[in-house]
Image (spheres, rainbow, N blue to C red):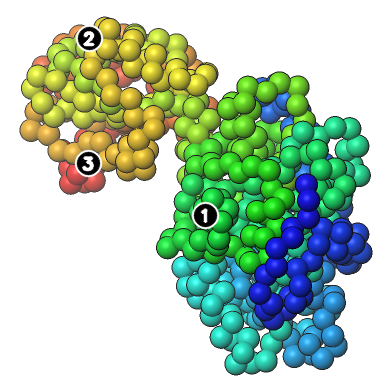
Amino acid sequence: MAAPKHKTAPRAGKPKAPLLLADYLQKILTARVYDVAVETPLEPARNLSKRLGNQVLLKREDTQPVFSFKLRGAYNKMARLSPAQLKRGVICASAGNHAQGVALAAGRLGCKALIVMPVTTPQVKVDAVRSHGGEVVLFGESYSDAHLHALELEARHGLTFVHPFDDPDVIAGQGTIAMEILRQHQAPIDAIFVAIGGGGLISGVAAYIKSVRPEIKVIGVQTNDSDAMLRSVKAGKRVQLHDVGLFADGTAVKLVGEETFRLARALVDDYIVVDTDAACAAIKDVFQDTRSILEPSGALGVAAIKQYVDTHRCKGKTFVAITCGANMNFDRLRFVAERAEVGEEREALFAVTIPEERGSFKRFCELVGPRAVTEFNYRISDAKQAHIFVGLATTRRAESTQLAKLFARHGFATLDLTGDELAKEHVRHMVGGRSSLADDERLYRFVFPERPGALMRFLSSMDPGWNISLFHYRNQGADHGRILVGIQVPRADKKAFKAFLEGLAYPCEDETDNPVYRLFLR
């Protein structure tokens, strides 16, 4: 592909005339990154490759000393500053990973570093910056907000601004990743998938690839709520987003750089947009192959490969995903684990209406059969019919549609909620409430073995005269499932119910007198 030709207006910290592709190649080849960075491995994702029918290679930038590629560009820029600039100190704005690179580089070069980070930055990244000696200022909701504040502080204190992406030296530092990829894998590569925030990484990668191996496609990846680069390329000019999604905080940029836009527009072959669920599924895919946990932005390349293979029906190709970061708060893993199954379409969610009559609950469970139940929420609320929220493990895409038709054929009106954001985010946790129909209800917590048939054993052991008035179950990935059950047992059946519990041999706790139950469910 031809080098970028059109000119850009000069600005501080950038050359007056735009650099040509040959200029970037020279800057990448002479970049100073290895004083602090390591040459990261290019590892095969064996399980994912087998599943997709294509070779997937992971460029493990998450294994850098700061768990992100960002220290390459930061150090390459700072190592070229004059002694006077270093003495005054540096400043940057960052959602976290560039901040760690600047802080580490400042420590190595012996200068002060002031880091402006959005207030939404994961605490693990804030703590990491401080551990490297950086002074942190939290400001704004996104990188773009922090960037504007950093420019004010730069002018006020006479510091040198180290841009996270819109600087040729930063871009060249990131481009060394592509240099390593081609050195590590000299066989054909069909495409390299690169996450895009402000565009520094993909600009550096594309500049090197199109200089040396132009036949390799460079494909940019963004989330559907932070796609500033794609919108800008389509518009032919930089487009500023009003808001950005913050789940993939490492790529949450409202406005891409001038230089990165110029390079990406000329050099990037294609763009793919992925959603939150796809990113979560990709995090799980990488974990299963490497036992490492990426941050959402770090997994975007893997999510895009899966989407690309599905769209283009390719087989036998070789794809590289740059796993560009692993700085994620631990408490976010709960959300990732829950959404990963939906993102991979390994879980289908349904709202099912069943007649409110004895035996219908069991009949529906028999229809579910041996499929693993991931979630089951039910509360008696109407004398004639009941609505249940159920999640089922699936093995292939589009299986949810087939299951919905199966339930409907057997008389259970079904609404497929697999793609419904309200259901996934909120409703699944809110099914329940008080009911005037729950007479003689006893509430028990059971511990079930997580194996096929455990639920049916429970239902088959029950007296058909007893009615299940509440049922809540979630598969948490343990070897035992915890289930909350409300059972309407006539007072005359007290002894029979006790015998049922003893014969069942599942550990249980009577929660009928629990004040929380009486406040919210009784």
Q: Residue at x 53, y 80 (%)?
A: 149
Between circles 1 and 3, the one closer to the viewer is: 1
Circle number at residue 235: 1
Which percent across, then down, holds residue 101? Answer: 73, 67
Amino acid on which the number 2 mark rests in the picture: Gly
498 to 280, vertically: above or below: above
User: Which type of secondary structure does the marked residue at label 1 adopt?
Assistant: helix
Between circles 2 and 3, the one closer to the viewer is: 2
Between circles 1 and 2, the one closer to the viewer is: 1
Circle number at residue 309: none
User: Which type of secondary structure does the marked residue at label 3 adopt?
Assistant: helix
- Is 407 left, or right, of 335 in this rendering? left
Which percent across, then down, holds residue 405? Answer: 33, 12
Q: Which quarter of the picture shows residue 90?
A: bottom right
User: Which type of secondary structure does the marked residue at label 2 adopt?
Assistant: loop
Residue density around tag 3, few if under 14, some if 14–19, many if 20 or more, within 10 Å: some
> Is the residue under label 3 in contact with that under label 1 (CB below 8 Å)?
no
Circle number at residue 411: 2
Residue denoted by label 3 = 517
Of labels 2 and 3, earlier in sequence is 2
Residue density around tag 1, few if under 14, some if 14–19, many if 20 or more, within 10 Å: few
Query: Which residue sits furthest front?
Result: 6
Which percent across, then down, holds residue 125? Answer: 62, 64
Name the quadrant of the C terminus.
top left
Residue density around tag 2, few if under 14, some if 14–19, many if 20 or more, within 10 Å: few
Q: Residue at x 25, y 36 (%)?
A: 431
Q: Residue at x 27, y 7 (%)?
A: 409
CA separation in Å, label 1 and label 3: 56 Å
